[in-house]
């Protein structure tokens, strides 16, 4: 049985248009590199509405699950959701996301390393910057909230997209990158992270 070592786990990160416009590309990369992750693919591009819509709907359950989570988020805060149907909620969200993610260039990246998905999520912070922990990318560099997005009829501006699970990462990486765009190389620090004889 051939099981890959955890150090080969990969995840997708996209620096969103607000992160690029605010000059945070280097800072975002620095945070992941300092943790010991390895950048194995990166490009700068403008996304089409179709590319963005497909990205968010790679999982056929995304619309229902995200709609239900959003409605529960409103109810947990004692607020009335804008609509009661989860699919209507995600139709609104998806329209806002497409507008946001096509407003400027993006930097999609693939990061590799042990527990890459979880490490990136931890360093990135919670989706709503207002509630993201201090020390995370979203907690340190963004002041946006769901309240403001609803008031302004727009998507949350949170600098970075990060895959939520290993399966999601695999699907998203295949959506954004061809296999020959992902490089295999060794960094000096890998010896100190992974060599059992150190």
Image (cartoon, helix red, strand yellow):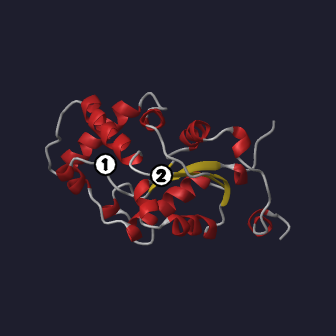
User: On the image, which quarter does residue 61 sit in?
Assistant: top left
Measure the alpha-carbon separation of dots 2 and 1: 16 Å
For the question of whether residue 139 can be seen, the reply is: yes
Of labels 2 and 1, earlier in sequence is 2
104 with respect to 37 (left or right): left
Q: Residue 120: where, in percent of width, then height?
A: 54, 58
Position of the N terminus by quadrant: top right
Q: Residues within 10 Å of mark 2 (few under 14, many from 20)?
A: some
Label 2, secondary structure: give it.
loop
User: On the image, which quarter does residue 194 sit in?
Assistant: bottom right
For the question of whether residue 125 can be seen, the reply is: no
Residue topped by disc 2: 105
Tell me: residue 143, above or below residue 99. Answer: below
Tell me: residue 61, above or below residue 198. Answer: above
In this view, the residue in front, 107 or 76, is: 107
Residue topped by disc 1: 155
Tell me: residue 189, above or below residue 120. Answer: below
Task: Give the residue drawn at x 80%, y 66%.
Answer: 191
């Amino acid at each position: 049985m051939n099981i890959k070592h955890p150090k080969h786990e990969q995840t997708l990160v996209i620096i969103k248009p607000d992160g690029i416009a605010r000059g945070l590309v280097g800072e975002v990369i620095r945070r992941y590199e300092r943790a010991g992750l390895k950048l194995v693919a990166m490009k700068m591009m403008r996304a089409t509405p179709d590319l963005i819509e497909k990205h968010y709907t790679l999982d056929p359950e995304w619309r229902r699950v995200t709609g239900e989570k959003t409605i529960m988020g409103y109810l947990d805060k004692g607020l009335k959701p804008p609509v009661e149907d989860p699919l209507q909620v995600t139709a609104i969200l998806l329209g806002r996301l497409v507008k946001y993610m096509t407003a400027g260039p993006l930097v999609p990246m693939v990061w590799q390393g042990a527990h890459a998905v979880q490490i990136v999520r931890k360093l990135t912070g919670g989706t709503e910057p207002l509630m993201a922990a201090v020390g995370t990318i979203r907690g340190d560099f963004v002041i946006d909230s769901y309240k403001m997005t609803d008031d302004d009829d727009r998507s949350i501006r949170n600098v970075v997209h990060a895959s939520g699970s290993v399966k999601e990462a695999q699907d998203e990486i295949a959506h954004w990158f061809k296999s020959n765009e992902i490089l295999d190389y060794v960094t000096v620090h890998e010896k100190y992270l992974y060599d059992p004889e150190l």
